[in-house]
């Protein structure tokens, strides 16, 4: 029962800081980022522990997190379904959680069981330190195509009841992709420094889902968002000239659809400007760029607080994104397995 470094088992990691901690922004380029992007970049959203099991009955994970009162929930998934959820003691700074595997994983076999994906909690920024098998052995799961997803709090997964229910996680399971979640709550305002960081990040497929925070937190007018969208896309394309790229425009936000912001623009007008910019770039020759209009993906009943989707809403976005990405990847000759 030797402890193994958790690092090789982690998936969904964009960058790491000098201590090896997953970071959702480039550690060599932090001084140009707005404070809200930087703060959310320190939260390990979307990071999972993926493994194969060889005659293993359980795995244990040693982790460190800020103490609190709410138990840490670890969800184990395989084959697109949740197998179990285990709650860990929230009172200790460093703890060990044991997760039982299905009986088939404990039987000796020439082929491994899995792959299994363990979704750790994201609150209180847990750091996964080590993992070990109880009976048999485990190994890191094979790498999947990397899908880098940039956006705001909706992309980050706010109001989903578990990390596994956030739409990037759910769509990644549908397509067999490894989502790298770069949703930054409060941000996702087409920050050009973020576009440059995305350009330097390895990715097999990209998705951009921003715009709603351009209505309120940092009010854009229509011409500004149209031109900023073009600039954002151009900067990303410097590093990913041929990578399939899907843009998702803002989903429904009832309070903002027809209400002018401080710059005089409604969310409906801003959405139209963003979509126009994407369509024009595609028409100009970017044949690996696609648009998924967000307005019709959700109804008011799918919003937990009038802005963020509930679990059903996240599932609807995931299904629509997966369908659009599958078509884009097929057209690019990179259809998912």
Image (cartoon, helix red, strand yellow):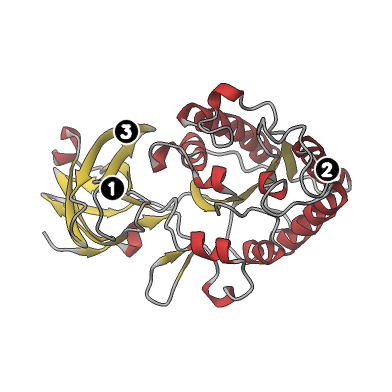
Image coordinates of residue 270 in percent, x first then y, are 79, 42
Name the residue carrying label 2: 273
Q: Residue at x 51, y 53 (%)?
A: 180
Q: In the image, which is nearer the foreground, mark 2 or mark 3? A: 2
Q: Residue at x 76, y 36 (%)?
A: 259
Q: Quadrant of residue 104?
A: top left
Name the residue carrying label 1: 52
Rendered image: mark on residue 82: 3
Between 35 and 8, the one nearer to me in the picture: 35
Q: Considering only vertical position in the picture, is 134 above or below 83? A: below
> Which sits earlier in the primary sequence, circle 2 or circle 3?
3
Image coordinates of residue 311 in percent, x first then y, are 46, 30
- Residues at discs 1 and 3 in contact (Cβ within 8 Å): no
Instruction: Determine whether, in the image, residue 280 is placed left or right of residue 252.
Output: right
Image coordinates of residue 92 in percent, x first then y, are 18, 59
**Helix, strand or loop for disc 3:** strand
Q: In the image, which is nearer the foreground, mark 2 or mark 1? A: 2
Q: Residue at x 52, y 73 (%)?
A: 27
Rendered image: mark on residue 242: none
Number of numbered markers = 3
Between 263 and 138, the one nearer to me in the picture: 263
Q: Considering only vertical position in the picture, is 139 above or below 337? A: below
Disc 2 from disc 1: Cα separation = 46 Å
Q: Considering only vertical position in the picture, is 59 above or below 103? A: below
**Helix, strand or loop for disc 2:** helix
């Amino acid at each position: 029962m030797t402890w193994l470094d958790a690092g090789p088992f982690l998936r969904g990691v964009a960058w790491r800081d000098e201590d090896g901690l997953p970071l959702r922004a480039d550690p060599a380029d932090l001084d140009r980022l707005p404070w809200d992007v930087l703060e959310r970049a320190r939260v390990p959203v979307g990071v999972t522990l993926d493994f194969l099991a060889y005659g293993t009955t359980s795995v244990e994970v040693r982790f460190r997190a800020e103490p609190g009162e709410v138990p840490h929930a670890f969800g184990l998934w395989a084959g697109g379904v949740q197998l179990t959820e285990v709650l860990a003691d929230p009172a200790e700074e460093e703890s060990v959680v044991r997760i039982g595997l299905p009986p088939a994983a404990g039987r000796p076999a020439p082929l491994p069981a899995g792959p299994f994906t363990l979704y750790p909690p994201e609150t209180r920024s847990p750091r996964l330190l080590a993992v070990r098998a109880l009976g048999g052995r485990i190994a890191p799961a094979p790498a999947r195509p990397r899908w880098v997803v940039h956006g705001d709090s909706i992309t980050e997964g706010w109001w989903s009841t578990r990390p596994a229910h956030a739409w990037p996680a759910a769509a990644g399971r549908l397509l067999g992709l490894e989502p790298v979640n770069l949703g930054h709550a409060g941000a996702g305002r087409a920050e050009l420094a973020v576009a440059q960081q995305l350009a330097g990040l390895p990715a097999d497929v990209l998705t951009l889902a921003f715009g709603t925070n351009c209505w309120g937190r940092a009010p854009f007018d229509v011409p500004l968002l149209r031109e900023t969208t073009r600039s954002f896309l151009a900067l990303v394309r410097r590093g990913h000239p041929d990578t399939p790229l899907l843009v998702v425009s803002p989903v429904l936000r009832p309070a903002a659809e027809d209400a002018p912001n401080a710059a005089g623009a409604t969310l409906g007008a801003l959405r139209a400007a963003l979509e126009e910019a994407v369509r024009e770039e595609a028409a100009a020759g970017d044949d690996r760029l696609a648009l998924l209009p967000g307005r019709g993906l959700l109804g008011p009943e799918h919003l937990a607080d009038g802005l963020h989707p509930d679990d059903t809403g996240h599932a609807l976005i995931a299904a629509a994104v997966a369908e659009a990405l599958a078509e884009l990847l097929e057209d690019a000759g990179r259809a998912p397995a």
